[in-house]
Amino acid sequence: MLYSTTFVYKGNTGGSVIISDSRIKTELEPVVFPCRYCDSSFYSDDLRVRHEWEEHPTKNPTFSIKGSEITSSRFYIREQVSIDEIELSNVQKIFINDVETDIEDLHSCIFEKPSKFLKVELVNRQVQKTFELEVSIPKLEEIEKVDEYFWLFLSRDDFTEELIDQFIKSTSELNSVTWYVDGLVKYLQGIMAKDGKTKFITFEDHEIRFNQARNILSTYASSLAHAVVALIDFNKNYFSDNTSKSTLPYLDRALIFFTGNDCNNSLNKIPDSAKSIPTDRITSLILDCVCNEFTGSSLEFIQQQLSRLKSQTLTVQDRSKLDYILFRKASLEGDITEAEKCRKKLKYNEVFDLSKFDENC
């Protein structure tokens, strides 16, 4: 079959075809960007963002217990808290373990059992903050029992792994203070690691154990917990005004010495009857030197004592404390050469203020 490939339009031959305008005539509305929080609208998204930032700032949700805002993502609760002592700010929704709830349910969920773990999510518009609450409320009588066993087995620098095991075994049935015992054991393990008394933990691991112990024990209000935390801070050269709550008078005295507040060097000897918490060998030597030997011993004697220490067992913090002791003793005896030698070693150390001894000591 043949097909024609030519098409002839017979109408309007010789002229152009007039096609009418069939487009729909409309007027386009300008694009606007409405505010998400009020009736305002803007001709650019940048203006909308600026408006929301200035007029409707979204504040971070806050969670406070007993007047103190929780700033870390993980928080430990060790005592009963009333509903009036829980404060939430800038919060639209609360989720506990992924279930929406309110503040009354939050309080009951926290304290219906003495031990539990909760994930609390606070939402304010597009902002969300998550807190992990570990609730473990100890019984006072069990805290006191743990302290009693600690002083019985471990109030000595020459403790052993066997004594630690005996301490753990003696406290194994005290169920409300499991974390408390664990914090004390972590501290003891840190001492053994620093002194090289164990094959299972290296010298480098002692700081990890100290940090673990501090994180746990800082959540308890017992005098023993305060004292151990203060000793760990002393080990790290954190010389704050928070002393050991009179549990360790020798540590309180050392803190006064290292902060330079005893500029007249009047350090009285600590009585032997004072309670002693185990410390690592270097820290024990430093405390003994400051509290018992500094005033009555010569610079040469102290230098001889310190020269016997193995350098590989000294941390940076240990070295700086020893340099400070020598600086103080050299300044007291008028040995300018030795004092300047120690001053140079401590030149860039922000912990120790040597300017106190330029004129007044």
Image: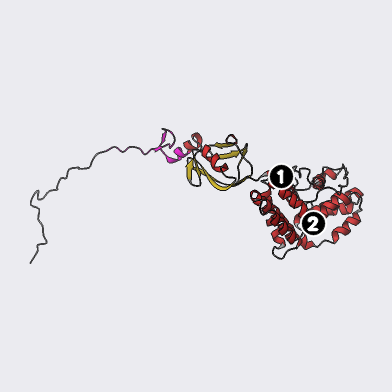
Residue 69's image quarter?
top right
Left or right for 225, reference 82: right
Between 312 and 222, the one lying in front of the other is: 222
Task: Give the residue number, with chain letter if any, for mark 2.
Answer: 157
- In magenta stretch: residue 39: yes
Q: Quadrant of the C terminus?
A: top right
Snapshot colouring: secondary structure
Q: CA distance from mark 2 to mark 1?
A: 21 Å
Whether 87 is drawn above or below 175: the answer is above
- In magenta stretch: residue 215: no
Predominant secondary structure, magenta span? loop
Give the secondary structure at mark 2.
loop
Left or right for 95, reference 181: left
The 10 Å Cα crowd at callout 2, few under 14, some 14 to 19, many 20 or more, is: some
Task: Give the residue number, with chain letter if any, for mark 1.
Answer: 222
Segment colored magenta: 26-49
Q: Is residue 355 visible?
A: yes
Q: Position of residue 156 (x, y in %)?
A: 80, 55
Q: Position of residue 83 (x, y in %)?
A: 57, 36
Q: Position of residue 10 (x, y in %)?
A: 7, 52
In the picture, the disc for residue 231 is none
